[in-house]
Amino acid sequence: MIRHRFSPFQAIKNMSYNALYTDLSGYYDLMCADINYQAQSNSAHRLQQIFGNGGQRHLDLACGTGPHIHHLLQYGYQCKGLDINQPMLDIAQQRCPSAQFELGNMCDFVTDEAYDFITCFLYSIHYSGDTQNLNNCIKSVHSALNKGGVFCFNSVDKNQIDNGLFAKHSVIHENSKFSFGSSWYYSGEGDKQTLKLSIEKSTMEETQCWTDEHPMVALSFYALSALLAPYFDVHIFEHDHDKLLPWDKKSGNAIFLCIKR
Ligand SMILES: C[S@@+](CC[C@H](N)C(=O)[O-])C[C@H]1O[C@@H](n2cnc3c(N)ncnc32)[C@H](O)[C@@H]1O
């Protein structure tokens, strides 16, 4: 039997961006099973060593279940994670008992302590939703950093989005087959793009499907650089976690490294 459970997302439309990470937080790590978090964390650490101030205070924005913190703790960072969804933070705290976690909005956060290294991965900066909120996020990050501290995140250029691309992978877990799908959609106009996600869970008896659409902020890399420029020296790299290559000015995925002036 195929049972479509669209209700969690459609019943609470205004909160649809929360639903996946609250109702389905238990599936999040399965959904990300094909992501090489070790390589991403190594590359972020390397960038911090090259461009940063040598400090160890780290904050991960939109930290989710804490995969980057898990790896960065091993380099000796004192890590804190901020996320808007408590169920994600609960899993992160279990995974990383020595780190601190806080519920909060990355577009509007104030900290008592200053950080040397702030990260935001898996394109989570786009969850800011619109340019105004993204600007607020950038200002909050700038205020939260020590002098010479770095902000490292990855991003997708709206003009390079291929609406026809769809990534899918499957995992067997506790006698169920999970299939996860994701794709970007950009209409070609304005500062909004959509992240479309789908989860299908099949057992011998039934198949359950969830779909979700997250409203995300859309920018070109030139527009994003212009937003960051008043606060940071900005370096853009190819989205390659094994090699440090300057952005070729064509790729639609990139790693941004921003040094607080
Ligand atoms: C795709 S997940 C990424 C999680 C983690 N960074 C990773 O790489 O696996 C996006 C995360 O962003 C969080 N999020 C969405 N909007 C947010 C906001 N405004 N402030 C803080 N966290 C937010 C979600 O709760 C979710 O945990």
Image (cartoon, rainbow, N blue to C red):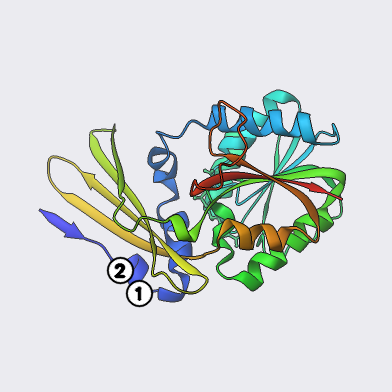
Q: Which residue is situated farthest in the right direction here?
A: 147
Is there a contact, CB below 8 Å, between mark 1 and mark 2? yes
Above or below, 15 against 25 in this view is below
Q: Nearer the viewer, residue 33 or 183?
A: 183
Q: Which residue is mark 2?
A: 7
Q: Which residue is mark 1?
A: 11
Classed neighbour count for the residue bearing mark 2: other residues with Cα under 10 Å, few (<14), some (14–19), many (≥20): few
Q: Amino acid at mark 2?
A: Ser
- The residue under the point 64% across, 36% down is 69
Q: Is residue 77 visible?
A: no
- The verdict on label 2 being within 8 Å of ligand 1 is no
Q: Secondary structure at mark 2?
A: helix
Q: Amino acid at mark 1?
A: Ala
- The residue under the point 72% across, 24% down is 75
Find residue 203 and report its horizontal and vertical position in percent. 18, 41
Find residue 250 and report its horizontal and vertical position in percent. 50, 47
Find residue 231 and report its horizontal and vertical position in percent. 81, 58
Q: Secondary structure at mark 1?
A: loop
Above or below, 220 against 261 in this view is below
Judged left or right of residue 17, residue 245 is right
Judged left or right of residue 26, residue 176 is left
Q: Which residue is situated farthest in the left direction here?
A: 1
Classed neighbour count for the residue bearing mark 1: other residues with Cα under 10 Å, few (<14), some (14–19), many (≥20): few
Find residue 244 and report its horizontal and vertical position in percent. 62, 30
